[in-house]
Image: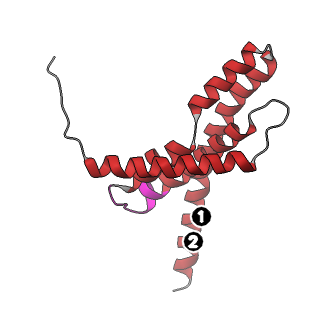
Amino acid sequence: MAARTREVDGLMLAVIALGGGIGALLRYGTSLVVPEAGGIPWQTLAVNAIGCLAIGVLMAVITEFRSAHRLVRPFLGVGVLGGFTTFSTYAVEVRRLLESGRMATAFGYLGGTVMISLGAVVLGLGATRWAVRTARRLGAGDE
């Protein structure tokens, strides 16, 4: 099997890195606003749910309704939203809950985060599709 190489796109790497930095700052800011209560990592759940909602909105907009510059998806999707969401922290938190003997909380957090995050993507996609189609219908009625 022959090795495949790809030319590195420096501009794309730069926009992803810039977006990742912005996303990480936004995640940190969110962690200051969302309190932790009852030993449940609400901050991580919040950023993952908000990030997944935003990913659903972004993907609907740039794949279905607008043509976007080639760097929009890497900057916003991979960079900003990739830096904002944190499923690696989520995995560590599940492990900590399990190690502390809080089995029900750990499994509830494990399954709940996945369900909430996937639901947020679907909600973001559906709400954006509905909003754009409604706006188009209303705009067509003005003529």
Q: Is residue 51 left or right of residue 9?
A: right
Which residue is tagged 1?
131
Q: In this view, does 59 lie to the left or right of 97?
A: left
The percent position of residue 19, horizontal first and vertical second, equals 45, 51
Which residue is tagged 2?
135
User: Helix, strand or loop at disc 1?
Assistant: helix
User: Helix, strand or loop at disc 2?
Assistant: helix
- Above or below: residue 142 compared with residue 51: below
Residue that sits furthest to the bottom in the current view: 143
Q: In which quarter of the image is the N terminus?
A: top left
Report the amino acid beneath label 1. Answer: Ala
* Residue 93, quarter of picture: top right
Q: Which residue shows up at 54% across the image and 78% down it?
A: 139
Q: Which residue shows up at 85% across the image and 32% down it?
A: 38
Report the amino acid beneath label 2. Answer: Ala
Q: Which residue shows up at 59% across the image and 64% down it?
A: 131
Q: Can residue 74 be seen in this view?
A: no
- Above or below: residue 15 compared with residue 42: below
Question: Does residue 16 show up magenta in the picture?
Answer: no
* Other-residue count near label 2 (Cα within 10 Å), few / some / many at <14 / 14–19 / ≥20: few
Q: Which residue shows up at 59% across the image and 60% down it?
A: 130
The percent position of residue 90, horizontal first and vertical second, equals 64, 30
Which contiguous range is marked in magenta?
Answer: 61-70
Q: Could you say which is closer to the camera, residue 137 or residue 103?
A: 103
Q: Can residue 134 be seen in this view?
A: yes
Q: Distance between the residues labelled 1 and 2?
A: 6 Å
The percent position of residue 100, horizontal first and vertical second, equals 78, 15
Q: Tags 1 and 2 in contact by the CB under 8 Å rule?
A: yes
Q: Which mark is residue 37?
A: none
The percent position of residue 17, horizontal first and vertical second, equals 40, 47
